[in-house]
Image: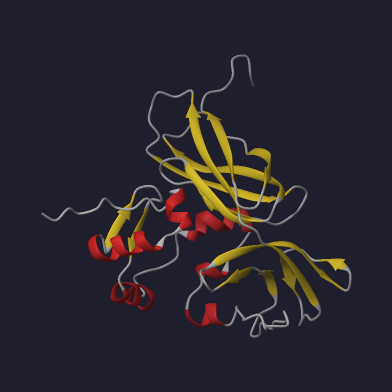
Amino acid sequence: MTVTPEPPDILSPEFAADPYPAYQVLREHYPVHYDAGTGSWLISRYEDVERAFRDPVFTSDNYDWQLEPVHGGRTIVQMSGHEHAVRRALVAPDGTFEIGGLRTGPVSLFVSTQRPSFIRANINRMEREGVAVNQNFVLKESLSGLHVVIDYGTGIIRGTVRFEGNDAPITDSRMYVNCRRAGARDGSGAPVDARGHFVISNLAPGSWEVTLQVNSLTPRPPRGIPIQKQIVNVANGSETEVTFVVALTPKQGGP
């Protein structure tokens, strides 16, 4: 008797520690699978992934609401083809890089690894000739001598968003959690899934400011939901738990 395994939970600590057994289960039993936790479709076989990269019917438009509110503009993961290729560059062994073909205007710079897996590194600071440069800046002419210092570690922030004060269930939500070093201007983040969970990994040890931004909710609450912030400490090789509680009704006697 053959027993089909359950679909893997890609938000679990087990998946974060070793994702390859889960990849095998997906390829063999769930090659096209809707993951309720992330609210997205997963494809795992080579032929399907190749088609998704080449067929224009597949887009990254969903990042419009996930990333642009946080980064203040269009990012490279929203681009494809030539537009994407000219805006990236490999970092040489001596730490130098060169990105050509850029137009003048707003620019956002990100650093990521490609092997053994894709990891978005947190930029600690950027400077040129001793003057601080924001991760999101306006390019007016060719720029050289830019120094980028990144944070990298094995700390994890894992969190939950809960709603209080409304009997009606939340049927749709768009929320994003951003984290940055306390006092810094730039950072990284992750969307909140359909179960109210989020995970931000590869964080350097130290103090981090964690911010919850609620972009939309269904049903819509009677008043706006303010941005919430918490300060947490992160250590290498450990997880830090964060809980946000969103009140959907105004306090008695409040404005």
The residue sitting at 35% across, 61% down in the picture is: 21
Residue 108 appears left or right of 50:
right
Work out whether 46 lies above or below 244.
below
Q: How many marks?
A: 0
Image-quadrant location for residue 28: bottom left
Residue 134 appears left or right of 213:
right
Quarter of the image for the C terminus: give it.
top right
Q: Position of residue 40 (x, y in %)?
A: 37, 55
Q: How is the image coloured?
A: secondary structure
Image-quadrant location for residue 132: bottom right
In this rendered view, identify the residue nearer to me: 255 or 186.
Answer: 186
Does residue 224 appear anywhere in the picture? no
The residue sitting at 57% across, 58% down in the picture is: 68
Does residue 40 appear anywhere in the picture? yes
In this rendered view, identify the residue nearer to me: 105 or 157.
Answer: 157
Q: Position of residue 250 (x, y in %)?
A: 56, 22
In this rendered view, identify the residue nearer to me: 28 or 43.
Answer: 28
